[in-house]
């Protein structure tokens, strides 16, 4: 049974795909405005992205949740969102007060405008639900078989159709319950606002504490895209971009921490490093500090001390919450499209409230972080970068790029048979593995890994920096490469010294693989078999495990069966059984 983390982790990961578009939206919207380039069509290009966030979330969340991240899920998400929002409008009952004073066509226009604004307010939650539903439908039905006369609509083509019909239920709920949903959002917004400084502190601290699980994206989505209302626009982030002077409370506090505090922590770690190791770690620490200052990407820094000194990381979370409160009390309202770095600070400077106060607050945070980190590292002899007894990276380590990097990571992660799921967020590989014991941490560190998180028995996160998504793609590509050159439509040669398994046992394997006609080829690779199948859906995982398979990994058109020392005997038995077809 999956842990709660394993259930929620895909949602946090899926939310990153549409959120990754926001920097482009923010830059276009900002530079096109009158106080900058004053080019209306550029500003409207950015506004178009913000105005269609619900649609982006529907497509992005669906793809993020779908196996293989297949585009059919995105189409399903779009279909679900469009059907739900448009159909819901026909079911809405407009309050009489909204059309009072209008007659004839004007009353109809007023009613339609009210419905449009209501749907816009609900667009992001509707988009997320549409994405969740469509992603689930893809994973459940992407291999569905229909009768021959309907075969064209089977498989992945079935998913958008199912999403369209499923959206009718969502449309009914929205159309009949829009007032209760909108009221619930208002209650949430007012409740957070009434909490005042306490609410800001809790949000800031939780945001940092949840980074270890990656679930902070869910928390961010609540406040950045749903909190408050400014002329029908919701969310702290979008309201700031739209010019709401009260927006930015849930973003401002990150700037002193990300631009000043964590770079100071890097400086403290550099000064605390052994003299002979400073040159070695100086480049890495300087790179992490510069990345945090310019872009607001801080996870590589945070994972460098998160597990070495948990109390220090807890203090970092408290200081982040305190920064939220301090900036709000000073009336500082800053905003961003991506994160709290120098680039976003400069782009949004003229839209901010009291932006220059960031300088003194930031310098104070620089001093606090430097002092606390230097004291803690020396007082408790923390093994931060450069203080290890031996170098953390083997002397033989080298930088590997391209296809070679993916294969190297795959080998260090225990091979394709050990990986059930490979995804990434901003700076981390997010993996579901069959066995954490098969992970080779020294090799991963030699490849550039900066930290590891094991939230559950089968979940692993590897901190690799901003290249995480590219590395994940390379690993998936390496998984799809054959581990040995297979002989098409034949069984790989088996040494005569290997005695095949019993005929009955071999027949059980063939049956579990979907029958003789379903097996296109078998290749033995050391302790595993790579079995090419005509229809992977016919392979029965439970029956394969009952037959003696220790672990199973599914790829596009094949399954990898981890068998251990008995792989040769099973391959020989399969050869004998399949040879009679």
Image (spheres, helix red, strand yellow):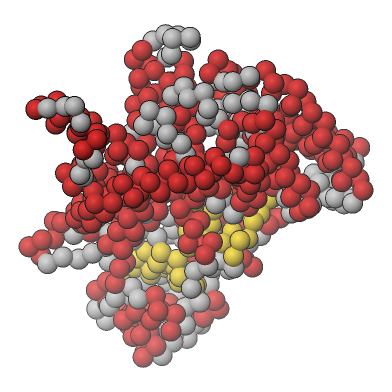
Residue at the image point whose x is 90% and y is 50% from the top: 381
User: How many marks can you see?
Assistant: 0
Residue 219 vs residue 406, the one in the foreground: 219
* Residue 71 image point, x, y percent: 31, 46
Residue at the image point whose x is 16% and y is 44% from the top: 90
Quarter assignment of residue 372: top right
* Residue 191 image point, x, y percent: 52, 45
Residue 429 vs residue 228, the one in the foreground: 228
**Rendered-image quadrant of the C terminus:** bottom left
Residue at the image point whose x is 79% and y is 48% from the top: 312
Residue at the image point whose x is 51% and y is 62% from the top: 6
Quarter assignment of residue 37: top left
* Residue 161 image point, x, y percent: 19, 53
**Left or right of 480, for residue 565:** right
**Left or right of 373, for residue 420:** left
* Residue 436 image point, x, y percent: 61, 65
Residue 288 vs residue 27, the one in the foreground: 27
Residue 252 vs residue 111, the one in the foreground: 111
Can residue 447 be seen in the rendering of this structure?
Answer: no
Above-or-below relation of 36 to 341 = above
Can residue 369 be seen in the rendering of this structure?
Answer: yes
**Left or right of 68, for residue 273:** right
């Amino acid at each position: 049974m999956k842990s709660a983390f394993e259930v929620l982790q895909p949602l946090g990961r899926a939310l990153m795909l549409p959120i990754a578009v926001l920097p482009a939206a923010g830059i276009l919207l900002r530079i096109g405005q009158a106080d900058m380039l004053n080019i209306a069509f550029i500003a409207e290009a950015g506004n178009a992205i913000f105005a269609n966030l619900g649609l982006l979330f529907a497509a992005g969340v669906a793809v993020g949740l779908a196996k293989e991240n297949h585009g059919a899920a995105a189409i399903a998400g779009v279909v679900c969102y469009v059907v739900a929002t448009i159909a819901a409008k026909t079911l809405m009952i407009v309050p009489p007060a909204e059309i009072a004073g209008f007659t004839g066509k004007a009353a109809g226009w007023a009613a339609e405008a009210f419905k449009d604004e209501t749907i816009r307010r609900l667009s992001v939650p509707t988009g997320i639900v549409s994405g969740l539903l469509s992603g689930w439908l893809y994973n459940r039905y992407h291999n569905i078989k229909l009768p021959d006369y309907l075969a064209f609509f089977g498989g992945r083509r079935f998913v958008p159709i199912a999403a369209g019909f499923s959206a009718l239920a969502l449309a009914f709920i929205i159309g009949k319950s829009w007032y209760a949903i909108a009221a619930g959002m208002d209650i949430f917004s007012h409740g957070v606002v009434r909490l005042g400084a306490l609410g800001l502190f809790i949000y800031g601290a939780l945001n940092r504490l949840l980074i270890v699980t990656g679930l902070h994206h869910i928390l961010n989505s609540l406040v950045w895209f749903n909190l408050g209302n400014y002329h029908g626009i919701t969310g702290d982030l979008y309201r700031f971009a739209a010019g709401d002077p009260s927006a930015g409370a849930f973003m401002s506090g990150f700037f002193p921490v990300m631009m000043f505090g964590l770079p100071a922590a890097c400086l403290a770690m550099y000064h605390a490093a052994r003299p002979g190791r400073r040159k070695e770690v100086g480049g890495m620490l300087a790179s992490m500090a510069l990345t945090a200052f310019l872009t607001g990407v801080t996870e590589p820094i945070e994972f460098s001390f998160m597990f070495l000194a948990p109390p220090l990381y807890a203090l970092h979370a408290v200081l982040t919450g305190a920064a939220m409160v301090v900036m709000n009390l000073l009336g500082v309202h800053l905003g961003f499209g991506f994160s709290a770095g120098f680039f976003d600070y400069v782009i949004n400077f003229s839209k901010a409230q009291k932006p220059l106060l960031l300088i003194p607050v930031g310098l104070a945070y620089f001093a606090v972080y430097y002092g606390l980190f230097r004291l803690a590292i020396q007082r408790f002899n923390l093994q931060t970068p450069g203080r290890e007894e031996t170098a953390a990276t083997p002397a033989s380590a080298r930088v590997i790029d391209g296809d070679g990097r993916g294969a190297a990571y795959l080998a260090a992660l225990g091979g394709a048979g050990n990986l059930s799921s490979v995804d990434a967020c901003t700076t981390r590989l997010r993996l579901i593995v069959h066995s954490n014991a098969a992970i080779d941490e020294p090799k991963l560190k030699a490849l550039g890994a900066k930290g590891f998180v094991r939230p559950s028995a089968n979940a692993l996160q590897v901190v690799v920096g901003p290249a995480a998504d590219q590395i994940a793609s390379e690993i998936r590509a390496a998984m799809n490469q054959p581990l040995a050159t297979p002989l098409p439509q034949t069984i790989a040669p088996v040494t005569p010294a290997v005695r095949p398994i019993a005929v009955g046992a071999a027949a059980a394997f063939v049956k579990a693989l979907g029958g003789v006609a379903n097996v296109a080829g078998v290749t033995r690779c050391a302790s595993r078999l790579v079995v090419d199948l005509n229809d992977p859906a016919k392979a029965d995982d439970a029956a394969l495990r009952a037959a003696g398979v220790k672990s199973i990994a599914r790829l596009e058109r094949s399954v990898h069966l981890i068998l251990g020392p008995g792989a040769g005997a099973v391959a020989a038995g399969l050869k004998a059984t399949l040879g009679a077809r």
